[in-house]
Amino acid sequence: MLPAACGLPPPPGLVAHRGASGEYPENTLASLTAASEQGAHMLEVDLQLAADGELVAVHDFEVETAWGPRIVEETPAEELRSLISDRNDIGAPYPTLAEILTALPGEMPLNLELKRRRADAALWPDRLLEELGARPRVLVSSFDWELLASIRRDAPDMPLAPIGARKPHDLLRAAERLGAATVHCHRRLAFGDFFTAAGSSGWPVIVYTVNDARTARDLFARGAAGVFTDFPGALLEELDLA
């Protein structure tokens, strides 16, 4: 069973990957709200630290604009909000974490994936914890395991999840160092030995990114506790979980 603090139900769990990103522009309020309304068990959203210290929901480190490319970490949040995502044909801005928390139901489980290239890792904990306050059901994940370690030092009880696409032993060692709640991995790692090793240490495994019921069922049979999906509503129906 996934840790209660994360807010996910017992397996199988479906995590909306950047919201309902197969149907709406990823990481937008429209995408996240749709996934919530479709019944996703948890919403995943990417976060970066903008130049003014605001946490903004953007996946790519660099975004294309009509004025040329902009590096997210070197651009103020208000300016980022005025830019249009390259996948966004409805004109929705990149939302801040504060806007996301206001727009979504307070009981909706969230997976915040932290993304960092040049921003100072030391600035992250205070900003993240200040924005979250006492909000429950939050899981913080990242490919940047050192950034997660900085969060752990300031938030001993925060549920954390290292993410990995290769080197499974390193991923599991990171989970041990971090006192992880869950482990998130690419499908290429999602085999019996990995599930067994993670399970022996009490770490549920959530696999990305899965958009068809056959693959999802196979992963759940192998031992996955959950999967990330771009189409939460459709997959919930196909798996008869709606």
Image (cartoon, rainbow, N blue to C red):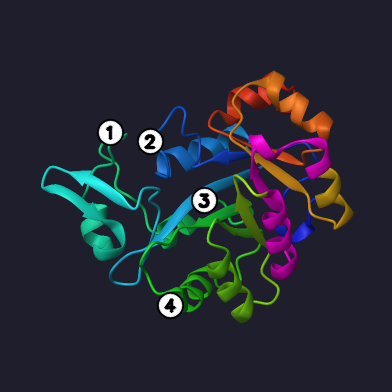
Secondary structure under the numbered disc 1 in the rendered image: loop
Gap between marks 1 and 4, in whole Å? 33 Å
Number of residues whose C-alpha sits closer than 10 Å to that of mark 4, classed few (under 14), some (14–19) or many (20 or more): few
Gap between marks 4 and 2, in whole Å? 28 Å
For the point 80% across and 40% down, the residue is 11
Residue type, numbered disc 2: Pro
Q: Is residue 184 visible?
A: yes
Q: Quadrant of the C terminus?
A: top right
In the rendered image, residue 172, in percent from the top left (x then y), is placed at 73, 56
In-image side of 36 versus 219 (left or right): left
Number of residues whose C-alpha sits closer than 10 Å to that of mark 3, classed few (under 14), some (14–19) or many (20 or more): some
Gap between marks 2 and 1, in whole Å? 8 Å
In the rendered image, residue 133, in percent from the top left (x then y), is placed at 55, 73
First in residue order: circle 3 vs circle 2: 2
In the rendered image, residue 161, in percent from the top left (x then y), is placed at 65, 58
Residue type, numbered disc 1: Ile
First in residue order: circle 3 vs circle 1: 1
The magenta region covers: 168-194
Magenta stretch encompasses residue 192: yes
Residue under label 2: 25
Residue under label 1: 90
Residue under label 3: 104
Q: Which of marks 1 and 4 is in front?
A: 4
Residue 123: assigned label: 4
